Amino acid sequence: MANVSPRPLIIIAGVGNGSGVGGATAHLFAKEGYRVALIARKAEEMAPLVAELIASGGEAAAFAVGAYTHAAVTALFPTILTHAWPTPAPSALRVAVYNVGFVVRKPFLRVSPANLAGVVDANVHGVFAFARAAVEAFRANALDARGKRGTLVFTGATGSTRGGEITSAFSAGKFALRALSQSLAKEFGKENIHVAHVVIDGPVMTDWAMNNFGDISKDWKENLDVRVDPKGVAMAYLYLVGQDRSAWTWEMDMRPAHEKW
Amino acid sequence: MANVSPRPLIIIAGVGNGSGVGGATAHLFAKEGYRVALIARKAEEMAPLVAELIASGGEAAAFAVGAYTHAAVTALFPTILTHAWPTPAPSALRVAVYNVGFVVRKPFLRVSPANLAGVVDANVHGVFAFARAAVEAFRANALDARGKRGTLVFTGATGSTRGGEITSAFSAGKFALRALSQSLAKEFGKENIHVAHVVIDGPVMTDWAMNNFGDISKDWKENLDVRVDPKGVAMAYLYLVGQDRSAWTWEMDMRPAHEKW
Amino acid sequence: MANVSPRPLIIIAGVGNGSGVGGATAHLFAKEGYRVALIARKAEEMAPLVAELIASGGEAAAFAVGAYTHAAVTALFPTILTHAWPTPAPSALRVAVYNVGFVVRKPFLRVSPANLAGVVDANVHGVFAFARAAVEAFRANALDARGKRGTLVFTGATGSTRGGEITSAFSAGKFALRALSQSLAKEFGKENIHVAHVVIDGPVMTDWAMNNFGDISKDWKENLDVRVDPKGVAMAYLYLVGQDRSAWTWEMDMRPAHEKW
Amino acid sequence: MANVSPRPLIIIAGVGNGSGVGGATAHLFAKEGYRVALIARKAEEMAPLVAELIASGGEAAAFAVGAYTHAAVTALFPTILTHAWPTPAPSALRVAVYNVGFVVRKPFLRVSPANLAGVVDANVHGVFAFARAAVEAFRANALDARGKRGTLVFTGATGSTRGGEITSAFSAGKFALRALSQSLAKEFGKENIHVAHVVIDGPVMTDWAMNNFGDISKDWKENLDVRVDPKGVAMAYLYLVGQDRSAWTWEMDMRPAHEKW
C-alpha cells in the first residue's frame, strides 16, 4: 500500500451528553475534516453524539473514563491513538480540548471531601495527565502550515478568575487549571505547541443547565443575547487552532452581549 | 434611483504609514468587502496604502488628523460618514478600530509634559471622541445577521496590563484605554454593540520598529516565531467582528510562539 | 546655632475639606511627629484642618493649587520644601501621599471634554508632576532605620481595576494612576524609594459623600461594617511607611467587612 | 474557680523548622500575648522553636501532621483547641495562619503523580479542612474591640498569580489557594471574620532556601534589599490582624526593595 498521509485527530475531554461545548466542538471539527475522539465519564451518554457525527460523514469514537484520575486518563491515550478507524489513514493528534468541569456550588461549610476529590481529579490529576499525553503526541508532529505542532485548549469559566461566595471549591479547581494552562503556554510555545485558555463568563445552554437551573425562563432558553451558545465557543476554538504562530492567544473571555459583568 | 443597500464601512485610526496593524486590517477588511476609511496624523504617509487598496479593487480614503484632540477627532467623523465614494451606495459604519499609539519609553524623570500631552491625546481625549462617534453611528444600524450593530476594537499592548520601568507614561495611557474599553463593553453590550480589546504582548514588525530598534537581528525580521505579524492581528480583528452575539470576547492577548512572558 | 536634625515632612495632596482620607492621614502622621503640608484646590476648605492640627501641637500648612496641572503642581513643591515653619529644624520630605480624586459618574455619551480634562489633570499631568518632585526630594535623603529614602502612596479605588458602566472617565484616570504607581515602584525600588498603591474598594464616609449620595441611610453613616472609615486607611498608610525594605508592598486592597464584591 | 477570661490563641500551619515565615509569626504573636499552636509535618523539627518561645515567656505547643490530608488536619483541631496549657485560662482561637507550601519546580513533563498529590494536599484538601475548622472556631467568638471574630491569613507566592515555565504544579496549587481565600473573604466577611492573602513575591531567607539554592551569594544572605526577611512578613500578618472592620485587606503583595518584577 502506498503511503497514506495522516488524518488530523481531535481529542475532546468533558463531552457529557454532547449538548454543550464539547459536543459543539466535535461537530465543528468533524465538519473541518478531523477525526473526533470523545472522552466522558459515561459511554452511553456519548452514543447519540457519536452516531450523529458518523451519520454526517465523520469518523468519531467515544472513550469512557470512570473518573478523571491521573492513571485513568493516562491509560486512555494509547487506546485512542491506536484506535482502528473505518478509514486506513493513521491519526495525527493535532488538537486536544479539555472541557471537563466539576461543578460545586454550595456554601463553604457544606463542601465535602468528596466534592474536593471531584474538583481535584477534574482540575489537577486528570488534566495534568491529559496535557502530558497531548504534549507528547504533539511533539511527534511536524510543523503544520501555520508553524504549529498542535493546539491544546482549556475551557475556563467565570470562576477561573474570581472566587465567589458559593464557589470556593469550584474556583479553586478552575484557578488551578488556569495556572496550568499559563505554565504550559510558556513552556511549550517555544516548541511551537499552542496552549490557550478560554474563559466562558456566562451561562452555557446545555441539557444539564436546563435540568439544574430551576428558574430558567423561556427568554433565557431562546435568547442568544443572554446565554452562551456552545457553537460560538466551538468557533472560538477553531479560530484559535487556526492562529498563525506569530500571534497566538493564550487567553480570551467570552460572554453574551447582554451579560452583566 | 432604486434603493441601494448600504455598503459596510470600517474606520481605522492609527494607520501610520500602513506597515503595521492598521494597514493589515485595512487590507483584510477591504478584501471582505468593506469600504475603508483611514485616519492618521499625516495624510501623505497614508497615500501608498490608499493606492494599494484601490488598485486591489477596494474603496479607500485617507483622513488626516493633526493631533488626536477631542475636537479634531470629533470633527472628522461627519466628514468620513458623508464622504463621496466612487460607487453610489451609502455607507454604514460597522467596524471601528482604534489602533492609535503614542510610544514613550524613557526613565520616569525624563518624561516631559509634551510626552504626557501626546499620551493623553492618544489614550484619553482622542479615543473618547472616537468611541463616542462610533457608538453613535452604530446605534443607527439595524442588527446584522449575527445580532450586532457594530464592533469597536482597541489595540492594546504589553503596557496595557503592566507598568514597566521605562513605560510610566506609555502604560498610564494604555491602562486608561483598557479601562475605557471595559466600560464601553459593559454599557453598550446591552445595545448589541460589541467592544473588544486586544493585548498585543510582543513586538510588531513595522517600518517604525525597523527604524527605531537599532539592534534588530535578521532573525527577528524574518522569523514569525519571535515577532508579531500584523496580518495575524488583523485576522483576530476580523474574527472578533464575526463573533455571534451569544459569545463575545472583550479581551484577548496575542504573542509570538517563542515569546518569553 | 548648633546643627539641627531635620524634621520629617509629609505632603498630602487631595485633602478636600479634611473629612476624608487626606485629613485622617494628616492627623495620624502629625501625631507621629511629622510636619504636615496639605494640598487641595481650595485654601479656605483646608483652614479648619490646619487649625486642628496646630491646636493638637502639630506643625501644618495648607497650599492651594488652582488645578492639578503639571505646571501648577511642579511650582508648588519648592514653596512647600522651603516653607518657614514655626520651629527652626529644616524639613526632610519622607512621605508623599497622592489622594487626589476627580469623580465622574455618568453614562459614556454624557462625558464631556471638561470631565476628561479634570480626570487627566488629576490622574496624569498633576500626578506625574507630584511624583517627580517627591522622588527628587526623596533622593536627597539618607536611608532611614528601615532602609528607605521615602515613601510615595497613591490612593486607588474600585475603579482602579474595573471599568464599570458609568465609570468610563473615572476608571480611565484611576487605571492610569495605577500604571504609574507600578512603574515607579519598579524603577525606584532599586533606589530604596518605596511606592505603594492602595485600592479602596468601598464607599468612604466623607462630607462629600454625605452631600452627594442622596440615599445614605442612617445605618451607612454609623455602621463601620458597611463603609470605609478614613482612619483605617490612614493606618494602612502609616503601616506602609513603616515597612522594612525587605518586604515592601506595592498594592493592597481595603473594604468594609460586609462589602459585597 | 472564678471566671477566667480566655487567652487568645494563634494556630500556624506550615512552620517547617521555624526558620521562615511561620517561625517569625510565632515569635511576633507570642510577644503580643498569644498562645501559639504550631503545625508542621515533623514534630522534631518544631522542638527548638517551641523551646525558644517558652524560654521567652510564651506558651507554645507543636502538633505534627503526617500529611496535609483533609482527615488529618480535621482531626488536629479538637486536639489543639482542648490542649492543656500551663496556665489555666481557656483558649480562644483568634488567628489562624496557613503557611503550608509544597514546592515543585521542574519541567512539566517531569511532574509526577506524587508531586501532584503533595500539591493537592497542601493547597486543597489540607487547607479546606484547616479553613473550615478555623471558621467554625471563630464563629464561637464575640466581636473583639475592632469588630472582628477572627482572622485567617494565607501565605501566597509569586506563583499565586503567575504560572511560570517550571511552576505548573506549584502554581496550580497556589492559584487554588488564592481562589479559596477570595471566596472565604466574601462569604465570611459578612460574619466579621477577616480573611487575607499575602503574596510574597520574592525569595524568603530560610534554612531550606540556604540548603536548596546552590548559588546563594553572600550578598543574598545578608542584604535585606534583595530577599525577604520573614520578620517583615510576620509584621504584615500582625498588621492585618489589627485592621479595623471598616477597612479590611483581602490581598497585599510584598517583595524586597530591589526585586525585579
Image (tube, coloured by chain):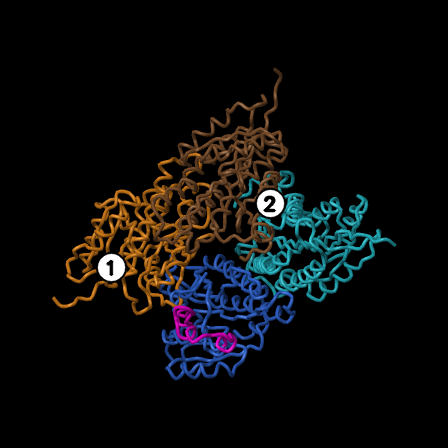
Chain colours: A brown, B cyan, C blue, D orange
Identity, as a three-letter code, of the amino acid under mark 2? Gly
What stretch of residues is rendered in magenta?
C208-234
Which chain's residue wears label 2? A
Q: Quadrant of residue C170?
A: bottom right
Q: Secondary structure at mark 1?
A: strand
Say which quadrant the N terminus of chain C sits in.
bottom left
Crowd class of label 2 (few under 14; some 14 to 19; many from 20; radius 10 Å): many
Q: Is residue B89 above or below residue A46?
A: below
Q: Residue furthest left?
A: D1
- Is residue B18 something that shows in the picture? yes
- Which residue is nearer to you in this view: A69 or C114? A69
C-alpha separation, residue under disc 1 versus residue under disc 2: 53 Å
Q: Which residue is mark 2?
A: A232
- At horizontal 25% and vertical 48% (from top left) the residue drawn is D75
- Is residue B219 something that shows in the picture? no
- Which residue is nearer to you in this view: A15 or C194? A15
> What percent of the width, then of the height, locates residue D49?
23, 52
Which chain's residue wears label 1? D
Q: Is residue A83 left or right of residue B14?
A: left
Q: Which residue is mark 1?
A: D9
Q: Is residue B178 above or below residue A144?
A: below
Crowd class of label 1 (few under 14; some 14 to 19; many from 20; radius 10 Å): many
Identity, as a three-letter code, of the amino acid under mark 1? Leu
